[in-house]
Image: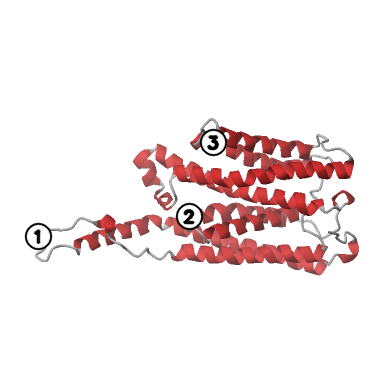
Amino acid sequence: MKFDFSNDHINTGVATLSSHFLWASALVLTLAMVSFALDLAGAPHRAARLEARRSTAAQTRATADGDVLVDAPATTQLTPEKRQWGGIGMSLSWLGTLLLIVAVATRTIAVGRPPLGNMYEFSMVGCMFAMVFFLAWSLKSDIRWLGVFVTGPIVLFEMLAAVVYYTAASSLMPSLQSYWLSIHVTVATLSVALSTLAFSLTVAYFVQNWRDERGEAGRERLKWMDALPSAASLDRTTYGVLIVAFPMWTFTLIAGAIWAQEAWGHYWNWDPKEVWTLVIWVVYAAYLHARATAGWSGKKAAYIALAGFAAILINYGVVNVYFVGQHSYSGL
């Protein structure tokens, strides 16, 4: 696989179009986030109306003379109430993701290579993968309850890319001109995208767990969280997502070492980027080990998961920008 890494192929007009599509995606996903929030806000009202319908349905099963009522609301089959805002949120999520895919595709055309050469491009592709994972999951399960927790961070990263990390279309520096760019960085981006979903689930877990710890008072205070699964279910789902993300990060670590050997003649140079890649791997390995062997779950495991994502953010927003080393590819 060969790419043209010269400046001759750079198309600034298409690159500008790509940035416009990114802004459009951020706007649409912001509207999706608001729609998902309104859907969650309406959850208590939907629950109250459903309970009223169950009560009415039970009463209609009274005997002919009306003396005896059949108390069977749990067995009464009721059509689920239409969730207009949730549906709007999902539709906007599909549109926003499509715009993001077009932004990545046009950036690829503009630079004539995989758009993975700087933080701006990495952010775009990472956001795209996270939204694609979310939407693919939504085809199997009704996860509109997760929408606000996913679109919120994605919009933030899109804005960071567009405002803070924006880098004009350009050719790659010599050390990145390798087929390993497509392999190593793509898998890393996939892993980070899944870790972002796990982070969203962990945040939802902490909110749900906070309610449970405060009993009835907590459940009444955040009634809209009734629309979400239980804290235990969120905890298990986070674990499942990270089980998939961790082997990808392991591959990222190994592939990076092989690429370093080809580029610099050493598998490991204790470069800041390499060190933080290892730190992330160790934290998530500790998370999976604690769950698999020590039986950790709940808050203790969730804290480790948060620490892992914090390490990713440090690697992404601090090491890439402020630490000078062989992996200084932020483009800033």
Q: Is residue 165 visible?
A: no
Q: For this view, does 113 lie left or right of residue 36?
A: right
The three-letter code of the residue at mark 3 reads: Ala
Which residue bears the numbered disc 1? 67
Q: CA distance from mark 2 to mark 1?
A: 42 Å
Q: For this view, does 314 lie left or right of residue 14?
A: left
- Crowd class of label 1 (few under 14; some 14 to 19; many from 20; radius 10 Å): few
Sequence-first disc among 2 and 1: 1
Q: Position of residue 329 (x, y in %)?
A: 81, 48
Q: Find numbered disc 2 in the image and state the secondary structure of the residue it sits on.
A: helix
Q: Residue at x 82, y 54 (%)?
A: 179
Q: Residue at x 13, y 63 (%)?
A: 63
Q: CA distance from mark 3 to mark 1?
A: 55 Å
Q: Nearer the viewer, mark 3 or mark 2?
A: 3
Q: Find numbered disc 3 in the image and state the secondary structure of the residue it sits on.
A: helix
**Numbered circles on residues, count:** 3
Q: Is residue 107 visible?
A: yes
Residue 301, numbered circle: 3
Q: Residue at x 57, y 56 (%)?
A: 134
Which residue bears the numbered disc 2? 145
- Crowd class of label 3 (few under 14; some 14 to 19; many from 20; radius 10 Å): many
Q: Position of residue 187 (x, y in %)?
A: 71, 50
The three-letter code of the residue at mark 1 reads: Asp
Give the image quarter of residue 260: top right
The three-letter code of the residue at mark 2 reads: Trp
Q: Position of residue 197 (x, y in %)?
A: 58, 50
